[in-house]
Image (cartoon, rainbow, N blue to C red):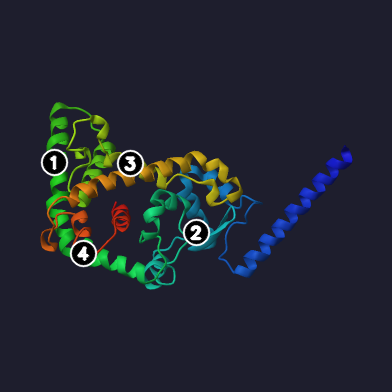
Amino acid sequence: METLWSIFLASLATLIVLWLGHTWVRRRLRTLPPGPFPFPILGNLLHVMIAGTDRHRYFARLAKQYGPIFSLQLGSTPVIVVSSPTLARALLQTHDRTFASRPPLINARLLMGNEYGEKIVTLLPYADEWKELRKLYIDQLFTPRRIREFQMDIVSHEIRRLIETQLVPASHAGDAVNLTECVGNLIEDIICRIIVRRRSENFFDESTTNISTHLSLSRLIHDVAYLLGAPLVSEFLPFLGFLDYKTKAAMRDWSSRFDSFMDHVISAREKDAVVEKDVARDILDMLLLPENKLSRGVIKALIMVSE
């Protein structure tokens, strides 16, 4: 028994030494920026997990130690971290074409779904299709005129509404106000009105009074904000992907709910009269313009990014 135990420990030690040597050689060959040496298997994931909510401070310490660009090994995934505004501008603006085709995160793929996940402009590689969708954003959805209209007609109105209906009455009554909740609801209402013209609480099937048909865009926005930040073990350690089954199921469920919601909203809007470009009142109006010739899947993808 002792002999078997000794053989096991010797084999384990050999594997660790080989892994460390392989990691050192790989980092040398890749000429990665400097960074903390990774643990076996987990890499630097353990450091990031220990940092917890103070992760930003941990990265700040690494930037002071290794410079404005450093590398981490998160499980099986090598990561380059940039902490300098100058380098960030160089990556995202000056050399944006070089770094445009980035591998998408697993959670983004799951949340987008199969029908239109490949049409999300932030997930597409730099190619003709990416250029066409980006042009649509610049030339139609978020032109300077449209942004001014959104600011004057929606943003300013919703802020004034919040102050007059909640903050002022609470102040006069001496009641406490949950500003986090108020601002969250304000942002959701602004997003909903910009995209589909109505506040988040005003979505229902107008053909029936059955409460089960109620559709909440507010709930969808709240859930996706959480799921986008949900950690996935399989992102860094693929062989432990089975641990993500609950989170992945929640992401697929959200994708299905968002898909049903948008089908409901788009179908209702398509029954309206055809909207002219100059009088389009929200993003959905603009996406449904006949001259754009967009499939329903692409429309859903563009609305998802707009959120």
Gap in Å between the C-alphas at discs 3 and 2? Answer: 33 Å
Q: Residue at label 3?
A: 222
As drawn, 188 above or below 89: above
Mark 1 neighbour class, 10 Å CA radius: few under 14, some 14 to 19, many 20 or more: few
Q: Residue at label 4?
A: 140
Q: Nearer the viewer, mark 3 or mark 2?
A: 3
Helix, strand or loop at label 4? It is helix
Residue 150 locus on image (x, y percent): 16, 55
- Asked whether residue 181 appears in the rendered view, the answer is yes
Q: Nearer the viewer, mark 3 or mark 1?
A: 3
Gap in Å between the C-alphas at discs 4 and 3? Answer: 27 Å
Mark 3 neighbour class, 10 Å CA radius: few under 14, some 14 to 19, many 20 or more: few
Gap in Å between the C-alphas at discs 2 and 4? Answer: 40 Å
Residue 85 locus on image (x, y percent): 39, 64
Q: The disc labelled 1 sits on which kind of residue?
A: Arg
Residue 75 locus on image (x, y percent): 59, 52
Q: Residue at label 2?
A: 63
Q: Which mark is residue 108?
A: none
Give the mark nearer the N terminus: 4 vs 1: 4
Q: Residue at label 1?
A: 161
Give the mark nearer the N terminus: 4 vs 3: 4
Residue ID at (53%, 62%): 70
Helix, strand or loop at label 1? It is helix
Give the mark nearer the N terminus: 2 vs 1: 2
Q: Is residue 25 left or right of residue 162?
A: right
Helix, strand or loop at label 3? It is helix
